[in-house]
């Protein structure tokens, strides 16, 4: 049974985010859904390689998944308005899990690509819905902490799911992983049934004034998370290998843990960023520090690899990058929620998720192209340049924000409101 929803006034009177109806079921569902996704993320490409397919096809399974994810995210806000959170999230969890069983049919190219795309559809709708739903059901003064806690659940799910999928495949075979992922996703679908039956808000037809273009409001935080996500695409693809190349002995041990180190740092500092935002009463306090940490981390990676420094410097670089990325993730989402009206929280979630997912996919491809021609150090140097562009955009936005003329109640608007007699037309 779905829980009863509260009015906005009742939600704001809650003294804890944990008391919001549907809050705990949402987080359990998100944990299960991302667990199912994490189980299969490294396994499907590995299965393709083990059955004689090329590295191109193995990579295409992830590429098709992400393409379907981003395409679905575009239409999810409309579905949340017309259908509602509960049915969209239940259907998305089913789409994320049930197609996993399709991989039991074999490893032909069309099977690998088709069912990867179907799972991507479920993942795309679910990621947009869960971020937007948190903004709908949690008091505004706890939104930073709630978003940070969402990052904790996602991080733990990935830290458990990624190695578990590989372990299950090695010990019991690929079919076991497919069935396990489907079952875990169905747990998410069951928990989604407990989510309040509410719909994304619509803008009232009689709302005063003309709207500012949504893209003008969210472009800068989108660039901030996108540039770091592009860097993460290179980090997640090449850092474990770079660690082992730098030090075959120590790196063989550390390399397997590098992504967990980055993910753990991101998880902790994303939550910290949310706590800071709630205490400050607004988003953005840790945005520039997070971007600076991300830049320092990826720049240090480039320097360490180029100069052959100790592999332990890469561990420090991973902590810096992961922590900075975690803070920027939270700040970008909160800034989008803060800049857009409540009627567009689903659009804010969609833009944030598309910036993140598209950035990760594009970064892994483009910076992989750079790595093939300028080594890992060259790829990370370019990644550092991308993050620097994001920092410049944030600095420019801060400056313009302090001097920006608002779209309402400014001089130009007031002059337009003054009645001016019109001259009669000449015949």
Image (cartoon, rainbow, N blue to C red):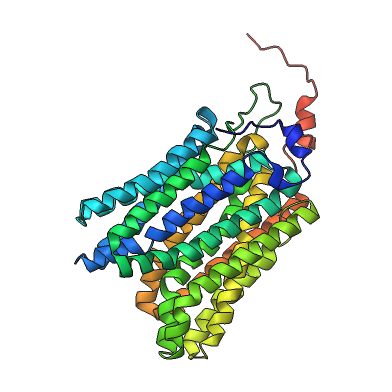
Q: Is residue 77 above or below residue 236?
A: above
Q: Is residue 324 above or below residue 67?
A: below
Classify residue 380 as left or right of residue 58.
Answer: right
Instruction: Give the quadrant of the C terminus.
Output: top right
- Give the x, y percent position of residue 128: 52, 45
Classify residue 398 as left or right of residue 199.
Answer: right
- The answer to whether any part of residue 3 appears in the image is yes
Q: Nearer the viewer, residue 357 or 26?
A: 26
- Give the x, y percent position of residue 266: 59, 66
The quadrant where residue 196 appears: top right
- Give the x, y percent position of residue 33: 47, 50
Q: Nearer the viewer, residue 110 or 376?
A: 110
Q: Is residue 210 above or below residue 301?
A: above
Residue appearing at x 27%, y 48% in the figure? 102
Classify residue 35 as left or right of residue 112.
Answer: right
- Give the x, y percent position of residue 14: 77, 41
Residue appearing at x 43%, y 68% in the figure? 163
Residue appearing at x 69%, y 25% in the figure? 207
- The answer to whether any part of residue 384 appears in the image is no
Instruction: Give the quadrant of the N terminus.
Output: top right
Residue appearing at x 60%, y 59% in the figure? 152
Tell me how many marks there are.
Answer: 0
């Amino acid at each position: 049974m779905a829980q009863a929803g509260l009015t906005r006034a009742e939600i704001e009177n809650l003294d804890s985010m944990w008391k919001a109806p549907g809050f705990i079921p949402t987080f359990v569902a998100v944990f299960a859904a991302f667990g199912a996704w994490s189980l299969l993320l490294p396994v499907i490409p590995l299965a393709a390689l083990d059955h004689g397919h090329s590295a191109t096809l193995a990579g295409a399974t992830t590429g098709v998944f992400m393409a379907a994810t981003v395409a679905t995210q575009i239409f999810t806000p409309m579905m949340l308005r017309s259908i509602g959170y509960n049915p969209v999230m239940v259907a998305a969890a089913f789409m994320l899990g049930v197609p996993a069983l399709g991989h039991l049919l074999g490893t032909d190219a069309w099977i690998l690509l088709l069912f990867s795309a179907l799972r991507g559809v479920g993942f795309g709708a679910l990621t947009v819905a869960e971020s937007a739903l948190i903004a709908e059901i949690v008091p505004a003064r706890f939104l930073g902490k709630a978003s940070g806690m969402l990052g904790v659940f996602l991080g733990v799910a990935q830290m458990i799911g990624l190695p578990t999928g590989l372990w299950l495949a090695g010990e019991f075979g690929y079919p076991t992983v497919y069935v396990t992922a489907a079952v875990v996703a169905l747990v998410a679908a069951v928990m989604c049934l407990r989510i309040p039956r509410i719909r994304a808000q619509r803008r009232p037809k009689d709302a005063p004034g003309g709207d500012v273009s949504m893209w003008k409001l969210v472009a800068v935080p989108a660039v901030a998370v996108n540039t770091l996500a592009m860097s993460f695409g290179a980090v997640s693809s090449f850092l474990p290998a770079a660690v082992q190349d730098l030090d075959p002995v120590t790196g063989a041990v550390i390399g397997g843990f590098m992504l967990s180190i980055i993910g753990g740092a991101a998880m902790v500092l994303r939550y910290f960023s949310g706590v800071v935002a709630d205490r400050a009463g607004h988003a953005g306090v840790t945005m520039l520090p997070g971007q600076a940490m991300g830049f320092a981390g990826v720049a240090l990676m480039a320097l360490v690899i180029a100069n052959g420094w100790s592999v332990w410097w890469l561990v420090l670089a991973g902590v810096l990058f992961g922590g900075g990325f975690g803070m920027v993730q939270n700040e970008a989402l909160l800034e989008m929620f803060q800049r857009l009206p409540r009627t567009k929280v689903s659009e804010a979630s969609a833009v944030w998720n598309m910036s993140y997912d598209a950035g990760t996919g594009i970064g892994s491809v483009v910076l992989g192209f750079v790595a093939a021609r300028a080594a890992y150090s060259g790829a990370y140097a370019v990644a550092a340049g991308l993050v620097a562009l994001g920092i410049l955009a944030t600095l420019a936005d801060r400056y313009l924000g302090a001097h920006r003329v608002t779209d309402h109640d400014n001089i130009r608007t007031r002059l337009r409101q003054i009645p001016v007699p019109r001259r009669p037309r000449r015949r």
